[in-house]
Amino acid sequence: MNRRLLTGPDGTTRCSWCGTDELYTSYHDTEWGRPLHGEAKVLEKLCLEGAQAGLSWITILRKRARYREVFDGFDPHAVARFDDRKVELLMTDTGIVRNRAKITAAIDNARATVELLENGASLDALCWSFRPPPRTSRLTEHDESPVTCLEAIALSKELKRHGFRFVGPTTMYAFMQSSGMIDDHIEGCWITPPAADGDDTT
């Protein structure tokens, strides 16, 4: 038996990390590893991956709806205008992770995104420019799961250079996994491997 695969009550074989929690399996089936584009969507994923530091992703996933409410859908221009009063208000909101450093990092990340846009660039394009070459085969039970890669390290450095925070190499590898830059579904998972050009064909 492959311990990195799990067949759920619905008869579907998935990567075992999502367990059988309906919210988690839905995330695995419909989002994780699928190409993600758009400034607000990429900013959201970047900020939430940073918010996960020291926590489990399911904790963040359960709070994501509230994050979207209080962070104005992660519209970079809107979040970039958040002030100290807004930070204090967010610190009282039990629906998100009440960590001042993570909250202010999300605001700084929005401001850095706006600066990119004002200079004719984009967060979306910058992140995807560091996409690693596609693997020739998927990970198996016997493969050791990577925690980072050269491209994630380089992306981390570039984002930090532009003023982004909570974007360390390990966090950036998780970001690449979840946003479809890397296919880390385990061999045998029902999700169809992505096309070579990165289009979502599942």
Image (spheres, grey):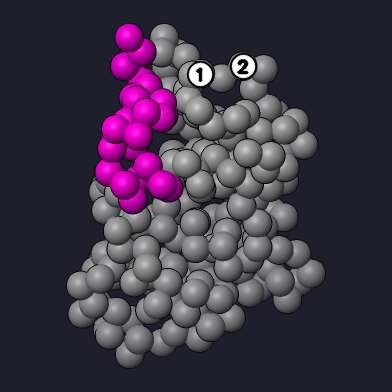
Q: Is residue 20 magenta?
A: yes
Tell whether label 1 touches label 2 (CB within 8 Å): yes
96 or 108, which is in the foreground?
96
Residue 197 screen position, x and y as percent: 77, 36
Residue type of the residue flagged with mark 2: Ser
| Mark 1 surroundings within 10 Å by alpha-carbon count, few (fewer than 14), some (14 through 19), many (20 or more) | some
Tell whether 5 sits left or right of 180: left
Residue 188 screen position, x and y as percent: 49, 19
Q: How many marks?
A: 2
Q: Which residues are magenta?
A: 1-27
| Mark 2 surroundings within 10 Å by alpha-carbon count, few (fewer than 14), some (14 through 19), many (20 or more) | few
Q: Is residue 139 above or below residue 109?
A: above
**Residue drawn where x is 34% and y is 55% of the image:** 61
**Residue drawn where x is 59% and y is 34% of the image:** 182
Secondary element at image label 2: loop
Q: Label 1, on which residue? A: 187
Q: Label 2, on which residue? A: 137
Q: Quadrant of the N terminus?
A: top left
Q: Is residue 109 magenta?
A: no
170 or 142, which is in the foreground?
142
Tell me the CA gap for discs 2 and 1. Answer: 8 Å
**Residue drawn where x is 41% and y is 87% of the image:** 83
